[in-house]
Image (cartoon, rainbow, N blue to C red):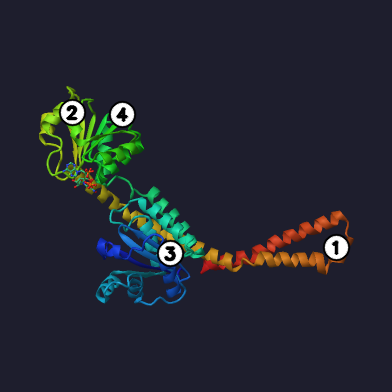
Amino acid sequence: MLDGYHILTLTHRNATLETIGKLVVEDGASPLLNGLKDRFDWEEMLYLATCNRVVFLFYSRQDVAENIAYELVSNIRPDLSAGEIETIGGQMRLLHGADAVRHWLEVAASMDSLVIGEREIIRQLREAYDRNHEAGLTGDHLRLLMRFTIETAKEIYSRTAIGQKAVSVVALAFAAMQNTAADRNSRILLVGAGQTNTLFAKFLAKSGYKNITVFNRTLKNAQTLAAALQGRAMPLDALQHYSEGFDCLVVCTGATQAVVTTDMYQHLLQGSTSKKVVVDLSVPNNVDKRIVSDFPVQFIEIEGLKTIAGENLAHREKERQKAEAIITERLNTFRGQWHERQVERALSHIPDEVRAVKEKAIYQVYSKQFAKLDPQAQSLVLEMMGYMEKKCVAIPIKTMKGMAKRE
Ligand SMILES: NC(=O)c1ccc[n+]([C@@H]2O[C@H](COP(=O)([O-])OP(=O)(O)OC[C@H]3O[C@@H](n4cnc5c(N)ncnc54)[C@H](OP(=O)(O)O)[C@@H]3O)[C@@H](O)[C@H]2O)c1
């Protein structure tokens, strides 16, 4: 059965992100993880940290002490006070057997995430597995579960709409801009080179936009972003004199007043009267609101996008039930696969033993008689013995697999 699988986890459901951060083990801290595995006598383990959880997935056939969470926290963070260890340990969840496997599948399908349906988790899971595998922490049980988990997550993404409809403000803003400015030669002015515009720029680059100019207070940061886009970089001061025209203006800085004024906008237009796309993801807005009323623009800002994000998230939530049903169905499949694998492992010595019996018969017990046969008869004997060998190997494996299925 799946009794050997266990999960000890701290997630956004029970703890703040700051608390979760306290259990994050640095990259390359495999001696610490190996130490945990030895200390708790786990056969295998996998450690995963994402922005909204820390998970210790492990395989152990021994009973797991109910207070293991406290011991784990004090091992990872011996510097914390007894009170803090008590609090964090109390916020952790301990799951066993099929419940643990189910939870792991839900994590992979992003059903337990802060933002449901984020496919990014599959990449994080794969990378975590590779790191843990390289560190010698995983074995056959987790390899089997991991392969099954990725398959299940992909199936859920393809059979449900859990990952469909964008929910991030930047993705939604980009999609709205793209609807109007579909031409990849559109002249795009990016104002600001912080995190948000960098993310927006990734969408631009991925979609093949090639005419981009980045303006930023610190020219160096504009240059870094422009280099990634094969675009041009300019200091923010140059925006007011810019005379090459534009189709889309994407503004997002940390300024608390308008960075693009009406006069500046009038100049940027260079006499053009066509409708422009203006994206302003800053809070508060960095584009003077009079631009929206005085000029023909499609204005995209956070307030309007928040409603769409909420609707899209609700749509994803509705898909959760379908995903749960797939997991229930897949959990049964995994039980079967796990049993088959155990049978394979338990009987892995049989082919070698049967072959040894065959070779002993031919080359020792009946060697004299065999040698007297003509080549044609020898070849027939070898063929028959080969056939017997194959069939004999299959009998116990088939029997055990049949028994496992009936259990
Ligand atoms: N991070 C998010 O998830 C997110 C999502 C939606 C909206 N927002 C909003 O987007 C805006 C920018 O956030 P961010 O996360 O991208 O910030 P960030 O990474 O800190 O970058 C800030 C950017 O604004 C520039 N800047 C800061 N103060 C300025 C000023 N007084 N005048 C001109 N430029 C200035 C910075 O230029 P330097 O390079 O010279 O420092 C930098 O390019 C904020 O209003 C934020 O509320 C953020």
Task: Give the label, 2 or 1, closer to the camera.
Answer: 2
The label number, if any, that marks residue 370 in the structure image? 1
Judged from the image, the secondary structure of the residue bearing numbered disc 2 is helix
Q: Which residue is mark 4?
A: 183
Residue at image x 89%, y 61%? 372
Depth order, front residue of 366/87:
87
- The residue under label 1 is which amino acid type? Phe
How far apart are the two marked residues, 2 and 3, measured between alpha carbons?
55 Å
Q: Which residue is mark 2?
A: 241
Q: Which residue is mark 3?
A: 30
Mark toward the start of the polypeptide (2 vs 4): 4
Residue 365: % across, % down = 82, 69
Residue at image x 36%, y 54%? 121
Mark toward the start of the polypeptide (2 vs 1): 2
Residue 148: % across, % down = 46, 57
Task: Say if residue 180 shows up in the picture.
Answer: no
Q: Is ligand 1 less than 8 Å from the beta carbon at label 1?
A: no
How far apart are the two marked residues, 4 and 3, measured between alpha carbons?
49 Å
- The residue under label 2 is which amino acid type? His
In the image, residue 12 sits, relative to residue 163, either above or below, namely below
